[in-house]
Image (cartoon, coloured by chain):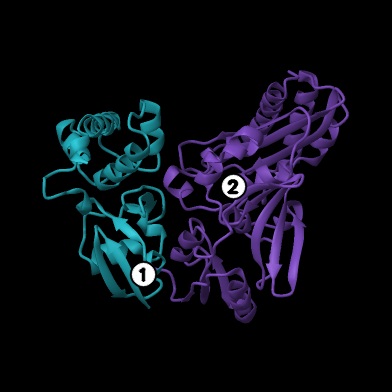
Amino acid sequence: MEVTITVNGTAHTLDLEPRQLLVHVIREQLRLTGTHIGCDSTSCGACTVLYDGTPVKSCTLFGVQADGVEITTVEGLLTAAGLDPMQAAFKEHHGLQCGYCTPGMMLVGKALIEENTSPSDDEVRTAISGNICRCTGYMNIVTAIQAAAAATTDAPANA
Amino acid sequence: MLPSSFEYHRPTTIDEALELLASLGDNGKVLAGGQSLIPMMKLRFAAPAHLVDINRIGGLDSIEEVGDELHIGALVRHKQLARSELITSKYPMIAAAAPQIADPLVRNLGTIGGSLTHCDPSGDLGAVMLAANARVALKSKDGEREVPVTEFLADTFQSSIEPNELLTEVRITSPTGAYGGTYLKLERKVGDYATVAVAARLGMANGSIGVAGIGLTSVGLTNIKATAAEEALVGQAPSQELFAEAGRLAAAAASPVSDVRGTDAYKRHMVEVYVRRGLTRSAELAGVA
């Protein structure tokens, strides 16, 4: 089935088998391997992408469902100007160790600060509660997302 | 994990979907949020030959009051339910349950229609809708029938929907007078199935309890409506003794099994505790505690 999916601003017309999961389309067809496969059972959030701006688990959607949809993967965070404030904050605040959950964490963080420019600890923890990190204990992830929110609010010229 | 091969259909109107479902018969399956169906397909517990994706059908995602009823469209996502001003201001039991379903990413896609049709005894909305005496509207080419959720949640992973039918709407009678409700969920971590959860609501009439609803999650082969406990409440003045008795009756209606989340005795006890607490909270919200 022919579909057109826009990923990180670029439209891709692809011929997909309906049973192909969105995560496989992103990783294997588009070769964007920043989107990870963790549990492959809707539990861990490593495969999180933004689906028309909303964070979803790309292992639990078929690629054909994304026809006409705008997808953002972690690769889409980087701009010509450099790291996105979310990426810069994860680097600065050591919001990762092994990095496996990081793409999902950053994308959930992006979606959160889009609608809440100053999230509390609880709000961040709720937002990332569908994403599992086995290294950090979450402390620095929460700090990083809050720092990215502050950086984004303080520097509207970047937007 | 890859599901078995299937043919994908994406109707844009209800009529088109009903036409497809009628022609596909037992080979067709409706895809809504997919947050239970797709994992089932990946595990090959489900292998439909045809998927009818209803996500592009307009008009199935509204939450509105019509006359004395609340109508929730089948495609309303759990996130939308949790954030609806109508729900948070007027339907406290649903408002309490919606943000506790699965995790935020699943709530962004999962739908009320899909959740109910999936008939998972660990489903949160099944218990809520049993406590709410909800009905579901099932449409087919031949027309529409309204089925009480008590009948709709027929068995484990088995609803009473016919292959040619589409669940389009969930309907609840709007509360009147003083009322309250809540959903209490015991879970090991976000995203895990409930160890035990209880949906409870009370509505007052002339100083005594006029309506009562209690639904149970994860303590039987389906969500359970604690009918004996509900009947014991109606017509009585709210009190801690009464709520404790309702808790005992609800626990007697539960049939939990021991698993990694706890023993059957523990779960039964937690039903009793949560029913008592849920009713106490409901009475507080109704202003009669």
Quadrant into which the C terminus of chain B falls: top right
Q: Callout 1: helix, strand or loop?
A: loop
Task: Give the side of residue A145 with respect to residue B21, left or right.
Answer: left
Say if B152 sits above or below B20 in the image.
above
Residue B174: x %, y % from top left = 74, 41
The disc placed on residue A20 is 1
For disc 2, the marked residue is B122
Q: Nearer the viewer, residue B248 or A131?
A: A131
Kindly report the distance in space between the C-alpha atoms of the residues bearing marks 2 and 1.
Answer: 28 Å
**Pointer 2 with pointer 1, Cβ within 8 A:** no
Disc 1 crowd rating (10 Å Cα; few below 14, some 14-19, many 20+) is some
Q: Chain A colour?
A: cyan
Which residue ends up furthest to the front in the rendered image?
A157
Residue B48: x %, y % from top left = 53, 73
Indicate the quadrant where residue B4 lies. Answer: bottom left
Q: Callout 2: helix, strand or loop?
A: loop
Q: Chain of mark 1?
A: A
Q: Chain of mark 2?
A: B
Do the dots labelled 2 and 1 sit on one chain?
A: no
Q: Is residue A59 visible?
A: yes
Q: Chain B colour?
A: purple
Residue at the image position 65 percent from the left and 78 percent from the top? B22
